[in-house]
Amino acid sequence: MAEEEETGRPTWSRQIEFTLAGIGCAVGLGNIWRFPYLCYRSGGGAFLVPYLLMLVVLGIPLLHMELTLGQYLRRGPVLALTKACPLLKGVGMATVAISFIMCTYYNIIITWALYYMFSSFRSELLWENCNNTWNTANCTDRVTNSSTSSTASQQFFNYKVLERTSGVEETGTLRWELFLLLLLSWILVYLCIFKGVKSTGKVVYFTALFPYVILLALLINNVQLPGAIDGIRFFIIPEWDKLLNVEVWINAAAQIFNSIGIGFGSLMAMASYNSYNNNILKDTLAISITNSVTSIFAGFVIFSAFGYMSHLQNVPVSEIAVDGPGLVFVVYPQAFATMPVAPLWAFLFFFMLLCLGLDSQFAMVEVMVTSLLDSYSKPILKYLKHKEFLVLVVCGSAFLLGIPNVMQVGIYVFQLMDHYTAIVSIMFLAFFEVVAVCWLYGVKRLCSNILEMTGKRPSIFFRVCWWVICPALITVILVFSVIQFKPARYEDYVYPPWAQGVGWLIALASIIWIPLAAVHTLWVLPGSFTERLKKSITPFSLDEDSENPYYKQKGAIMEVIPNIAVIGSIVPLSDKPPILD
């Protein structure tokens, strides 16, 4: 059980639980497919240079900032940002929305992993050859770049797993196998988190650590394959001319940013359950460095397989065609097909994906559960009686909303939601969070908070990063994302305008809370517009005025604005919701 300090705020039973939960939250499927994919597309080793630089000047300082704010204010993102910058309290509200939207479609990746994992219980993998009922005449059992043929692995994914239609206009029928596996994946999530720390605390030790065992086993196997050294050489030796491409630097910054989870509020919320005098810098370095080391470690595993495939195909590593999801569910399974003891390696790999996916899914589901409990605990517990039933309702709702992803049109729905949620929405959330904390809350105040908690002021490096470098980089990334924005597409299929419109509505479902909350803050504050605006960007201004309508409207604000208590793999909740200020 979690311990409680004098404030009544539950804290981690052991500090290692927070560190491990933070690592489990930060390390996910993106480390396995998005990092190798961006690295491959950006010239291999050339990507590592800006990636490591962005880790130092962007990832570590911003993570340190989030953990500091959460630990000092002892609140999740919503109430923490309400205190730090009332005008931008909507950023915290948006994190609740984006987490729930993402958890509805993110579980489809776990569903696919389960499908492949169960399909590996055979002496011969189903994607090894073209002698199957779903294969077409242009199928080939070797890796190819030909535009007129497709591999057995590609056809297995498209025609057997997905049975995909020609586009989003054609919905097709429900894929009952995937439907049942989606149900199974949600049952797994529920069983892992419904008891809070009692159940999740035990699970996370396995789900956070076991993937490293499998990655190591895969690496030992892969480096012994012919051609593996060529793939590793491509991964670690930079093509220096690629560094002149601005997109490589932007991709590196965006990968650090998305991988650690800056802007999602998850780690800030978990830090709110730290001991007040906890060493924040130690946790910052442990989480951020472990996250990047995992990405690089996964890079060696993936690129050694690329080298093996280039050897089979007799083409340079740089000419193997890969894309994001296809890297995991098409390219890598094709490499398994020719390995010794192929079913074993396939099972281990997809079981690893399951562990990584569950770890991230815990975080996204728990943010919805705890925010509902903190905001509406009395009416919820009046009707549902127990927290376990609330978890069931949330999981059930997300399951129902995820059903379109397991129809034959599912891959197009998945790609549309992921593009407008994970790419568009999160960039805006992070930008406003950095503005709120680094500039409006202030670097000086942030440094004072750290001094009060740990007895040491942050170094000049962190102060410069918070004041100048981080806001500048985030602004550049946001501007570049807007200028270079490309509508959602899947392979060669371009979504029609109405589908793009639906995508923007999905993005607005989270972004809209930022302006709405800003208008609300200005509405409830007393005084002229200028006085309201000044108060709205003054930290703790809502706390200072006891006559403020913000607090006088009983049941209004505190019911509307949920406190995200904990997002993460371990949720140290007591039997009662945390006490709100």
Image: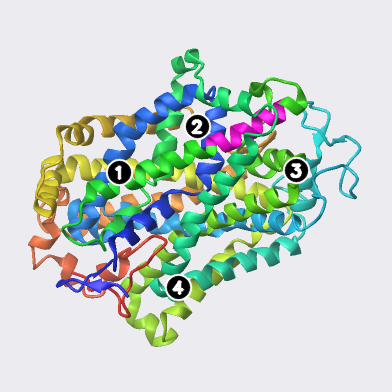
Percent across and percent down for residue 221 are 64, 40
Left/right placement of residue 263 relative to residue 337 reads left
The answer to the question of whether label 3 and label 1 lie on touching residues, with beta carbons closer than 8 A, is no
Where residue 457 appears, as percent x and y from the top left, is: 11, 43
Q: Give how far apart the Cα atoms at labels 2 and 3 are.
A: 43 Å
Q: Amino acid at mark 3?
A: Pro
Earlier along the polypeptide chain: callout 3 or callout 4? Answer: 4
Residue 332, placed above or below residue 185? above
Residue 285 is tagged as: 1
Horizontally, residue 419 falls left or right of residue 76, namely: right
Query: Can you say whether 391 is above or below 72 in the image?
Result: below
Q: Residues within 10 Å of mark 4 (few under 14, many from 20)?
A: some
Q: How many numbered circles does the render carry? A: 4
**Residue that numbered label 3 is attached to:** 340
Q: Secondary structure under badge 4?
A: helix
Residue 389: x and y in percent read 47, 80
Q: Residue at x 46, y 56 (%)?
A: 208
Q: CA distance from mark 4 to mark 2?
A: 42 Å
Residue under numbered circle 4? 199
The kind of secondary structure element at disc 2 is loop
370 left or right, relative to 442:
right
